[in-house]
Image (cartoon, helix red, strand yellow):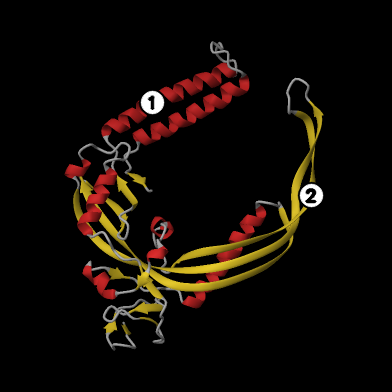
Amino acid sequence: MARCNFCDASFEAGPGDLLLVCPYCGTAQTVDGVKFKDHYMIRCHFDQTESQRTLLDWLSKQLGVPEDLAAKARFVGYKQIWYPMWISRVDARSDYHGQGRDANFHGRWPQYPGAYKRYTYFWKPESGTFTRRHEIKIAAVAGIDEDVRDHPIPTRAKEFFSHSHAEEFDGEVLHSQITVEQAKEMAKKIAFDKQTALIMQEVDKIDSRTDNIDVGETYLVHVPVWELEFKYGNSRYLASVAASTGYVIESKYPRSLTFRAMGLGFGFIMLAVGGMMIAMADGFIPNILGLGLGLGNVTGGILAALGLVLLYKGASRKEAKEKI
């Protein structure tokens, strides 16, 4: 349990929670009772009914969904979770010196334009500067679903946090398990890694670099997500819908018997055709298609691989998972 330093109310908090949100007065505060002012939210625009309707409409358009899913699906559980996210705006400049790998080509093939018999590699000095502004997002709780964690946040629509707004939908507001100082350090490291990725697009190895990384505005934003559960037949399926935009973040759902039968049928055909093309290219059976060795093997391999994928999709009874 924790006690609010501003309204003196007691409320639940876990041992890993470091920035608390009072469910009575809505004040964000550290475990030492210091008020945190840069606390925002993304307003909820889709209630439970609208989110359920949006989900069913989206599911009905997915490949292989049973035609009667929207009519026979029955919602058996729902809750609105307000996930805390740290947002940092980071200005970064990186000056680098490195080595890029280049090649010299020797012995042009006269019968193959643009082809050479051999080539040699050499290192070429490279240098440059990358200046970027990054908006870094960090999940403030552990164990958050990766699809929810990575879903875009419309930060321009943020407004100061109102706990009464969350209470309108009986929402559960999660505390942050990361302090603002920790969030800034993590944002600085992520920005450094992003700058490194930019540099490595230009060079193969870095000899030296100078980085100026400035972590600017950092704030906590709570994002509402509807966690829904519906039943179809004897199985239950989970889905996450963004309460602010109505986007389906992710959803599991069944595949119809017709879809599975088609998957098995096309899978067998593609696997058979792919195997036949490989056999003809390798000379095991007469090459009635006139395929070259390389073309037959590559095309046949692709068809065979696609066939195996379709066979797996058709044979598997595991529910499908789709995300936008």
What residue is rendered at 58% in x and 16% in y? Answer: 291
| Nearer the observer, 302 or 311 | 302
Q: Is residue 233 above or below residue 79?
A: above
**56 in relation to 48, above or below:** above
Q: Is residue 36 above or below residue 101?
A: below
x%, y% of residue 216?
53, 73
Type of the residue with mark 2? Lys
Q: Residue at x 58, y 67 (%)?
A: 91
Type of amino acid at the residue the image marks with label 1: Phe
| Disc ID at residue 124 | 2
Q: Is residue 127 left or right of residue 234?
A: right
Q: Quadrant of residue 309?
A: top left
Q: Position of residue 44 (x, y in %)?
A: 29, 64
Q: Where's residue 30, x and y in %?
A: 41, 82
Q: Position of residue 24 (x, y in %)?
A: 26, 80
Residue 266: mark? 1
Mark 2 or 1 closer to N-term?
A: 2
Q: Quadrant of residue 168?
A: bottom left
Q: Which label belongs to residue 13?
A: none
Residue ID at (36%, 46%): 322
